[in-house]
Structures are given as structure tokens and as C-alpha cells.
Image: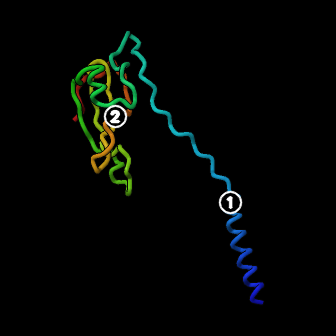
Amino acid sequence: MKNQIVIALALGVALSFAGCASRSEPAKAPAPKAAAAPRAAAGGSNILSKVSVGMTKAQVKEAVGAPSDENSYESGKRWIPFYYGNDVRRSTWYYKGQGRVVFAEGNQFGGGGNEVVNVVIDPAETGVAPE
């Protein structure tokens, strides 16, 4: 009787591990691609076409110059428990008649960030940050 219980337990454990091993991983959705480098505006060239996702603020300033205006704001990701990504703050640089460049500012501990996450080419850009 004791041997039958041991065999039954061993068989149960073996089957549970076999069941876990036989499950296939669910298909993961492909990671969203980073935005491609911006295209030139229809009316001609745009200085923001030199900016691409992943560039730092220093690289952007060197490539296209200082912005007309800028602002900084908190993203909602700050309130996600245990979020350690680099996107709890964002800042946007506005270039009059050219568009906007959006930067990830880092995490709540001061690390990471300081890189371009989006470039918006907009010839109608006023160059003034919204209040």
C-alpha cells in the first residue's frame, strides 16, 4: 500500500512537470518598431529630418540647434507600481515652423532617459509650448 502511494505521488509530479513542459509559449506580439526618421515636409527640406529616435538632447541640439520653446511633464507611468522604465517624465522641444521633438526624461530614480522617443514634423508649429 505504501509503495502504491509513493508511485502515485511520483507519477502525479512527473505528469505535472510534463504538462508544464508540453505547453507552448503563447505567440508574442512583435515589439512596436521605433518611429522611422522623419520625412521632409512637402514644401521642401525640414531641419528635423536630421533627428532620429534614440538621439540624446546634446546630439539634437548639435544637429538642429536650440528649440524655440520647451516644456517638461510627468507621464502616467510614474504611478505604475514597480515600473523601472525610462519614461516617467517627458519633455518636448518646439521648433517654430518645423515641428516638435519628444524626449524620455528617465525614471523616478534619476537614471536612464534623455533620448528622443518621437519626432513630429509640422510646418504649422507655432514654436510655443502649450500652457
Residue type pointed to by label 2: Glu
Q: Nearer the viewer, mark 2 or mark 1?
A: 1
| Position of residue 64 in the picture relative to residue 23 (left or right) | left
Distance from disc 2 to disc 1, alpha carbons, whole Å, reads: 40 Å
Q: Position of residue 74 (x, y in %)?
A: 28, 44
- Total marks shown come to 2
Q: Residues within 10 Å of mark 1 (few under 14, many from 20)?
A: few
| Vertical position of residue 106 compared to residue 42: above or below | below
* Image quadrant where one finds the N terminus: bottom right
| Vertical position of residue 2 compared to residue 115: above or below | below
Q: Which residue is mark 2?
A: 115
Identify the residue at image location x=29%, y=50%.
108
| Label 2 element class | strand
Residue type pointed to by label 1: Ala
Q: Position of residue 116 (x, y in %)?
A: 35, 32
Depth check: 59 or 118 in front? 59
Q: Which residue is mark 1?
A: 21
| Position of residue 109 in the picture relative to residue 6 (left or right) | left
Identify the residue at image location x=38%, y=19%.
49
